[in-house]
C-alpha cells in the first residue's frame, strides 16, 4: 500500500521503520530536522564540541519495553545516567536534592521539612490503596483526602509532577489521581529504594534517529508540512504547504492530536470529540551555562531541579533545570544546564540554544479520550499515534506506533 506518515518524532519514525519494508511510505515533516523531541545540538563550552540533548534525554529498561528493544535492535550505544531530583525555592529560601536532603543545614531545624519527609513516606504507603476506592478522583482530591501537608504538596509532589510532565503545579493538581499514581508506582517513585537504573544515548539521541531513518531516508520530505487531509473515493488526499496534492491508501498521523484534528478536512464527530480533548502546554527550552539556575548549595544539585521564585508557585508554566553534565556523558569542565521556562534570562554570553516544545496535558477529559482512541483507529484508512495516548513519553509514542503497525498487518522485528 501507499502510506503517508505525518510527523517524524519517535512515533512517526517508529511507524515508518516498521511499515517501510512492506509498503510504499512517505514521511512528511514540517520542520528542518528529524526526531521531534529527539533533538541533539552541538555546543562548545570549552572549545570542544559536545552533543547535548534538548528534549528526549533518558529511558530505563523496566518501563521502556519497546524503546529498549528497538535500541538493541539498531545497536544504539547507551550509557548509565542519573535521575536525582531537587528543588530551589525563592532564591535559596528552601533547597534540597534527593541525594542531599540536608545539604541545606537549616532543614534540620525545620519542623515543616520533617513533616514533608513524613508525608512522602505516608503518600508512598497510602496512594495505591486510595486508588482502589477512589478511581475517579483528581490528584488534588487525593492529597486533600489523605490530609497531606502544604510543604509536601508544593515542594515535593506538585514540584516533581510538574517537572515530569512539563506543566504548571496548578495543572498537575487536575490530573486524574489514577494516571499520576500509576505512573509513580510503575517508575518506583512510591518507594525510596526501588528506582530503576536510567540510561541515555551516548552521543545524543540523534544517534538513534540516524539509525532508525537510514533505510527510508529517501522517503522523507523535510520542511514539508501538511495543510489538509481529505477522504475521497476510498482513498486519502494529502495537501502539503507547497500546494502539492498526493493520494494515499492509508494515513498515519504521528503528530500531536490537536494538529491532526486541524489537518482533517471534514473530521467526524468521533474525531472531533476524541482528538479535541487533548490539550498541550508550550514550554521554552534554554540551553546555557548559568549556574544561578541551580541550587546555591552544591550538595542540593540534582539532575532535575524544580525552580520557583515564590514560596507559592502561581506560574502558568513550570520552571526547572536539567543538569546535563550529570545526565549525559559530557564531562564536568564547564556547566551545561537546560532550563525550562526560566523566570529570568540566563546570562547572555552563556546561552547556547533556545527552542520551544509542546507537551500534552493530562486532564480527566484527555485520559477519558485515551480510552476511546480505538473508536477512530483505521476508520476511513486513518490511523493515529503519539505520546498523548498514554503518559506522554518516548515509550508511549513508540508503543502507539507499534500498535498501529500491527493493526495494518506488520510484525515487529524486535519482538
Image (spheres, rainbow, N blue to C red):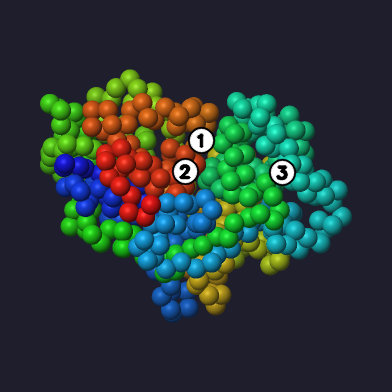
Could you say whether the residue bearing mark 2 is in a helix, strand or loop? loop
Position of residue 187 measured from the top left corner of the image (x, y, whole percent): 59, 49
The answer to whether residue 51 shows anywhere in this view is no
Q: Is residue 205 left or right of residue 231?
A: right
How packed mark 3 is, by other alpha carbons closer than 10 Å (few <14, some 14-19, many 20 or more), is some
User: Who's the residue at 77% across and 42% down the image?
Assistant: 122
Q: CA distance from mark 1 to mark 2?
A: 9 Å
Position of residue 194 measured from the top left corner of the image (x, y, whole percent): 66, 54
Q: Is residue 314 left or right of residue 407?
A: right
Q: CA distance from mark 3 to mark 2?
A: 23 Å
The answer to whether residue 395 shows anywhere in this view is yes
Q: Is residue 163 left or right of residue 231?
A: right
Front in this rendered view, residue 19 or 344:
19
Quarter location, residue 5: top left
- Please give the residue where the numbered disc 3 appears in the rendered image: 124
Instruction: Tell me which numbered mark, 3 or 2, is placed earlier along the sequence.
Output: 3
Q: CA distance from mark 1 to mark 3?
A: 22 Å
- Please give the residue where the numbered disc 1 appears in the rendered image: 362
Q: Nearer the viewer, mark 3 or mark 2?
A: 3
Residue that protrudes farthest toward the bottom in the picture: 47
Could you say whether the residue bearing mark 3 is in a helix, strand or loop? helix
Quarter location, residue 213: bottom left
Front in this rendered view, residue 260 or 45:
260
Q: Are marks 1 and 2 in contact (CB under 8 Å)?
A: yes
Q: Is residue 351 left or right of residue 6?
A: right
Instruction: Tell me which numbered mark, 1 or 2, is placed earlier along the sequence.
Output: 1
| Position above or below: 269 against 96 | above
| Position above or below: 279 against 157 | above
Q: Quadrant of the N terminus?
A: top left
- Please give the residue where the numbered disc 2 appears in the rendered image: 392
User: Who's the residue at 54% across and 53% down the image?
Assistant: 62
Instruction: Tell me which numbered mark, 1 or 3, is placed earlier along the sequence.
Output: 3
Amino acid at each position: 500500500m501507499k502510506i503517508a506518515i505525518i510527523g517524524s518524532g519517535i512515533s512517526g519514525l517508529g511507524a515508518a521503520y516498521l511499515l517501510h519494508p512492506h509498503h510504499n511510505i512517505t514521511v512528511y515533516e514540517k520542520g528542518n530536522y528529524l526526531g521531534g523531541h529527539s533533538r541533539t545540538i552541538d555546543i562548545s563550552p570549552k572549545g570542544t564540541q559536545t552533543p547535548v540533548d534538548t528534549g528526549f534525554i533518558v529511558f530505563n529498561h523496566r518501563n521502556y519495553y519497546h524503546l529498549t528493544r528497538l535500541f538493541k535492535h539498531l545497536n544504539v550505544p547507551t550509557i548509565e545516567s542519573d535521575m536525582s531530583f531537587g528543588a530551589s525555592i525563592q532564591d535559596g529560601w528552601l533547597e534540597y536534592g534527593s541525594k542531599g536532603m540536608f545539604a541545606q543545614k537549616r532543614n534540620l531545624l525545620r519542623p515543616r521539612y520533617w513533616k514533608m519527609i513524613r508525608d512522602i513516606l505516608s503518600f508512598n504507603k497510602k496512594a495505591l490503596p486510595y486508588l482502589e476506592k477512589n478511581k475517579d478522583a483528581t490528584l488534588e482530591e487525593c492529597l486533600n483526602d489523605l490530609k497531606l501537608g502544604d510543604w509536601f504538596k508544593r515542594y515535593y509532589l506538585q514540584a516533581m509532577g510538574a517537572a515530569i510532565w512539563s506543566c504548571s503545579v496548578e495543572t498537575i493538581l487536575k490530573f486524574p489521581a489514577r494516571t499520576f499514581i500509576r505512573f509513580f508506582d510503575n517508575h518506583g517513585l512510591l518507594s525510596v529504594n526501588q528506582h530503576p537504573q536510567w540510561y541515555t544515548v551516548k552521543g545524543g539521541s540523534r544517534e538513534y534517529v540516524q539509525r532508525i531513518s537510514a533505510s527510508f531516508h529517501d522517503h522523507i520530505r523535510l520542511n514539508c508540512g501538511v495543510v489538509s487531509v481529505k477522504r475521497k473515493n476510498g482513498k486519502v488526499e494529502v495537501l502539503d504547504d507547497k500546494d502539492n496534492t498526493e493520494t494515499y491508501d492509508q494515513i498515519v498521523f504521528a503528530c500531536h492530536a490537536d494538529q491532526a484534528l486541524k489537518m482533517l478536512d471534514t473530521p467526524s464527530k468521533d474525531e472531533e470529540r476524541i482528538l479535541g480533548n487533548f490539550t498541550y502546554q508550550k514550554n521554552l527550552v534554554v540551553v546555557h551555562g548559568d549556574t544561578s539556575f541551580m541550587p546555591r548549595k552544591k550538595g542540593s544539585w540534582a539532575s532535575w531541579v524544580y525552580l520557583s521564585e515564590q514560596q507559592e508557585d502561581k506560574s502558568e508554566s513550570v520552571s526547572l533545570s536539567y543538569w546535563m553534565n550529570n545526565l549525559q556523558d559530557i564531562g564536568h569542565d564547564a556547566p551545561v544546564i537546560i532550563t525550562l521556562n526560566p523566570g529570568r534570562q540566563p546570562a547572555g554570553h552563556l546561552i547556547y540554544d533556545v527552542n520551544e516544545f509542546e507537551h500534552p496535558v493530562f486532564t480527566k477529559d484527555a485520559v477519558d479520550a485515551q480510552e476511546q482512541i480505538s473508536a477512530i483507529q483505521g476508520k476511513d484508512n486513518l490511523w493515529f499515534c503519539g505520546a498523548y495516548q498514554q503518559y506522554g513519553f518516548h515509550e508511549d509514542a513508540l508503543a502507539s506506533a507499534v500498535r498501529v503497525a500491527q493493526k495494518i498487518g506488520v510484525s515487529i522485528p524486535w519482538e
